[in-house]
Image (spheres, helix red, strand yellow):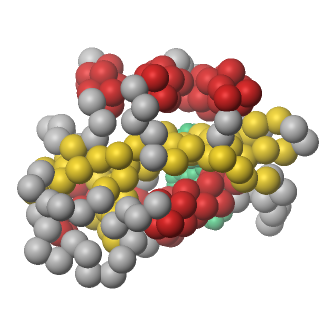
Amino acid sequence: MLRCMANNRAECLKDLDQVRDLYEEAFNEPVEADLVDSLRESGRIAVAIVAELDQEIVGHILFSPASIEGAKIKIAALGPVAVLPEYPGRRIGSELVQDGLDECLSLGYDAVIVLGDADFYSRFDFQSASEFGIEPQWDGIPDEAFMILELHTGVLEGVSGIAHYAPEFDDVMRQSAA
Ligand SMILES: CC(C)(COP(=O)(O)OP(=O)(O)OC[C@H]1O[C@@H](n2cnc3c(N)ncnc32)[C@H](O)[C@@H]1OP(=O)(O)O)[C@@H](O)C(=O)NCCC(=O)NCCS
């Protein structure tokens, strides 16, 4: 198996154009690139990390502040995350996820939500959020696709309800439903 040779570091101003190009290439459309730009414009970024290889940005991950209705715990939402299609399966994505989760922990977040592939995110111990009685704010999301990870064991005890993403995600969900 190829090992990840990329170096992960915090995103900085000089990266922004390359990060935009990366999302457009990875997703083959501008939706996620626009989402990242609008979250940045509104200041709703908790963690943003780039993976760099030979001075090229080959991966990026973003976490934004989220919430669960009525709960006093600090929640981050993972996503989007992308790796350039020419570097598949080199653990670049996995290391971005792991470093991002570590950073969320060090910033005092209690739990992280994600909407995505259960096979991929279960590798990091994400569980179906419905097991905790936590649901996404949008209709029509498959149960297994909405997941949560406790960064502190037991922090979700007694917590249930609707999870809310930053408002910028509404546009994305509208476009993907259209
Ligand atoms: C998803 C993505 C970030 C993964 O990055 P990556 O560097 O290729 O992934 P890794 O090398 O860390 O993968 C680790 C494992 O997860 C698997 N995996 C990767 N992407 C997966 C996916 N979308 N679903 C399920 N499994 C996946 C890999 O096959 C690999 O399996 P293995 O350990 O059995 O070999 C990357 O494929 C990507 O950018 N995809 C397009 C954008 C996207 O879908 N982003 C996620 C939604 S926001």
Judge left or right: residue 138 versus residue 119: left
Residue 35 visible to the viewer? no
Report whether residue 162 is seen. yes
- Name the residue at 68% across, 21% down: 17
List x then y, in percent, for residue 92: 70, 53
Residue 24 falls left or right of residue 86: left
Place of residue 121 in the rendered image (x, y in percent of width and height, measured from the top left): 46, 61
Please say if 25 is above or below 89.
above
Q: Residue furthest right?
A: 54
The vertical placement of 111 against 142, above or below, is below
The image quadrant where one finds the N terminus is: bottom right
Give me the residue at 65% from left, 40% from top. Answer: 11
Left/right placement of residue 95 relative to residue 122 reads right
| Number of numbered markers | 0
Residue 60, image x, y percentages: 63, 42
From the viewer's perspective, is 42 left or right of 164?
right
Identify whether 64 is placed above or below 176.
below
Front residue of 144/73: it is 73
Residue 169 in the image: state x and y as whole percent. Answer: 32, 31
- Which is nearer the eye, 164 or 142? 164
The extreme bottom residue here reads 153
Q: Residue at x 33, y 81 (%)?
A: 153
Please name the residue shown 51% across and 43% down the image: 62
If the image is split into quadrants, where does the C terminus sit?
top left
